Structures are given as structure tokens and as C-alpha cells.
Amino acid sequence: MKNNVPVGIIMGSDSDLPIMQEAAKILDYFEIEYELTIVSAHRTPERLVDYAKKSKSKGIQVIIAGAGGAAHLPGMVASLTELPVIGVPIKTSTLNGLDSLLSIVQMPRGVPVATVAINGSKNAGILAAQIIGLKDSDIQKKVLKYKEEMKEEVVKKADKLEEIGYSEYLK
């Protein structure tokens, strides 16, 4: 694991990587360094405790934790650190991620986990950038630029739809 990176991205299994890579990609876009690793709440509990307790001293400012099923990883990490934790519920084949979502959002009082949509790791990366941007004006400017680009993209699509009509637009 790296030292002096502002974001830690963890997941319960390598099967979560296709979803969690979107957080890494958006952090790459914002030029925010991160570490990415597997920390299973149930199969490697000692690794989880070690990761959570050492994160702040390693320079991490925000932890993004993705988990499916029982999805205890984000909450357990949040219970062991004062750093903000962003939970990413991973879609499961059994309950389509609803089990993961409920496991992450139903945290007890005093142990908050910011939670994004099922499979919403890109939003988790954006939220991490916004948090870091509170103290880093360069990152804040990149986030604002990204949001402006999204706005421009929507306006272009609206203009095109209005110009050619829905049936032509859908072709």
C-alpha cells in the first residue's frame, strides 16, 4: 500500500473491481492519487482493522469502500476511523444490490457512511474529489470544470433533440 495518497479505494473482493474501477478512473481524470486494494470484512478482518486504523497516518483523507451482499466493509471501516467513508453498494445476483444498499445506509447513530447508488463508484470518486477540493483549490477547480463540461454536454444533446426530433435522434 502507498503512503501520502489522499484516497483509499477498497473492495471486499476482486469481483468488485469492474465496478470500483470507475472510482479510480474519475480520480485519474482529476489527477488525484489513490491506492486500490482488496480488504474483506469477513475473510480478512485483521487486514480491515489494520487498514482502517493506519489510513489517516498514511495520508489518506477519504476512503471509498465497495462491497456486495452483507456489505459490512464500509461500516466496519467507518467504525474504526475518523476519516470520511463513502460506501459503494455492489449489485448482487440475489437481490440486485438492494441487500448491499441497505447494509451500507442503515448505519447506527455515530457511525456515518456516505452512500452512493448501487454500482455508483464514479459518483463516489467525484464525492471524494469534492471533499479533497475543500482544502485543495486546484482539485476544486477541476471538479467545477468537470461539472461545466457535463452541463455543456446536456445542452448540446437538448439542442440536437429539439432540432431533429425524437425519432431521428434515436436512430
Image: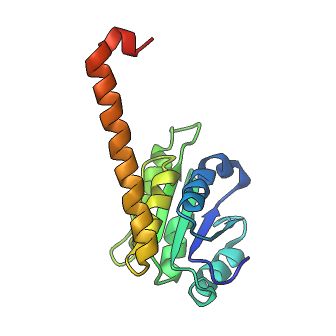
Name the one closer to the observer, 82 or 99. Answer: 82
Compared to residue 112, the image places residue 156 above or below, namely: above
- Residue 30, percent from left and from top: 52, 62
Counting from the top left corner in percent of width and height, residue 37 is at 70, 66
Q: Residue at x 40, y 67 (%)?
A: 141
Residue 157 picture location, percent across and down = 35, 29
Q: Residue at x 38, y 46 (%)?
A: 150
Q: Between residue 142 and residue 47, name the one nearer to us.
A: 142
Q: Is residue 101 above or below residue 78?
A: above
| Residue 93 x, y percent position in the rendering | 59, 37
In this picture, residue 116 sits left or right of residue 36: left
Name the quarter where the N terminus is drawn. bottom right
Residue 113 shows in this picture:
no
Q: Based on the displayed image, in which of its 4 quarters is residue 2 positioned?
A: bottom right
Q: What residue is shown at x 53% (from left), y 65% (from top)?
A: 64
Is residue 21 toward the left or the right of residue 140 in the image? right
The image quadrant that residue 49 belongs to is bottom right
Name the residue furthest bottom: 57
| Observer able to see residue 19 | yes
The C terminus: image quadrant: top left
